[in-house]
Amino acid sequence: MSNPTVGFIGLGIMGKPMARHLLKAGFPLFIHNRSRAAVDELSKEGARPAANSREVAQQSEVIITMLPDSPDCELVYAGENGIFAGVKSGTLLIDMSSISPVVARKLAADAEKRGCAMLDAPVSGGEAGAIAAALSIMIGGKVAAVERAMPIFEKLGKNIVHVGDAGAGQVTKAANQMVVGTTIAIVSEALVLAAKAGVDPAKVRQALLGGFAQSKILEAHGQKMLDRNFKPGFRIRLHEKDMKIALATGSEYGVPLMVTGVVGQMMTAMKGMGNGDLDHAALVKFVEELAQQELVAAK
């Protein structure tokens, strides 16, 4: 049985390596992106460029979107030259962006009116996870659609969980971003405290990795902080957007998210300081500014 033709829209830090995995796995691929460089790069590897999202939809049996925010998704799906303008009944739509659960549910309902199944399937793992095809994929939607999408998901991730109906994937992603963001913030505070108290933060990190404070954030992002490596794997401005989604979801369901709110404001401050395009590990720079202490590991 041959692989279905896949349309992939959104070839950024995450989307480009994800699309490349599908291409290497033998999926015929139609691609579209706002900027041209990634399209040209993947076209040389065998992908076929499309002029707009509508053209992608006309050519594809499965369509994946990987976009920055809810308004981007609404435009790409429902705009004049969007997916819904060209989609055929029976097409499987998979949005792997991180967006509002409310928007995810609306898009799924609009897709169903057109005879299409739609999944919200946001991911976690950052650029490294996308490149390694080791993403965690959180899926909302109907079981039959999940089963149909599974051969594709298996080329992109390792931890693939169907968490519920439409929108459930986005609720799960909001929870993920809360945990990641607040953990980055507390690792930042802990290491800057160590440095200002005259203790080598690199050794503090090493000690904490052996106890209950151990986490992937302390391991990976803590090292980024020490190395001053803030090349974006996931940009602060996008994480701030996700924290706002979490806060709006909490407000909708009457759940106070106080720690999330504080860390979201730290990210807003970083954006205001002109640091929104740095990796979210750069949140340590905000703590350093307040403490008047740069995090410098002892040589």
Image (cartoon, rainbow, N blue to C red):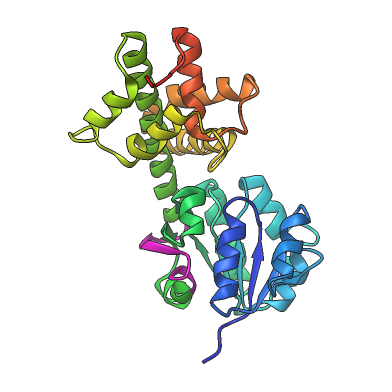
- Asked if residue 154 lies left or right of residue 73, the reply is left
Image coordinates of residue 17 in percent, x first then y, are 57, 60
Give the residue drawn at x 54%, y 57%. 96
Farthest front residue in view:
299
Visible residue check, residue 116: no
The one of 212 and 179 positioned closer to us in this rendering: 212
- Asked if residue 100 lies left or right of residue 158, the reply is right
**Against 155, is 121 above or below?**
above
Farthest left residue in view:
211
Give the residue drawn at x 40%, y 34%. 223
**Against 237, is 164 above or below?**
below
Image coordinates of residue 116 in percent, x first then y, are 59, 73
Farthest bottom residue in view:
1
Visible residue check, residue 1: yes
Magenta span contains residue 5: no
Q: Specify the segment rendered in magenta.
A: 152-167
Q: How many marks?
A: 0
The one of 205 and 249 positioned closer to us in this rendering: 205
Image coordinates of residue 296 in percent, x first then y, are 43, 19
Give the residue drawn at x 19%, y 35%. 210
Magenta span contains residue 165: yes
The one of 52 and 110 positioned closer to us in this rendering: 52
Determine the image quadrant of residue 11: bottom right
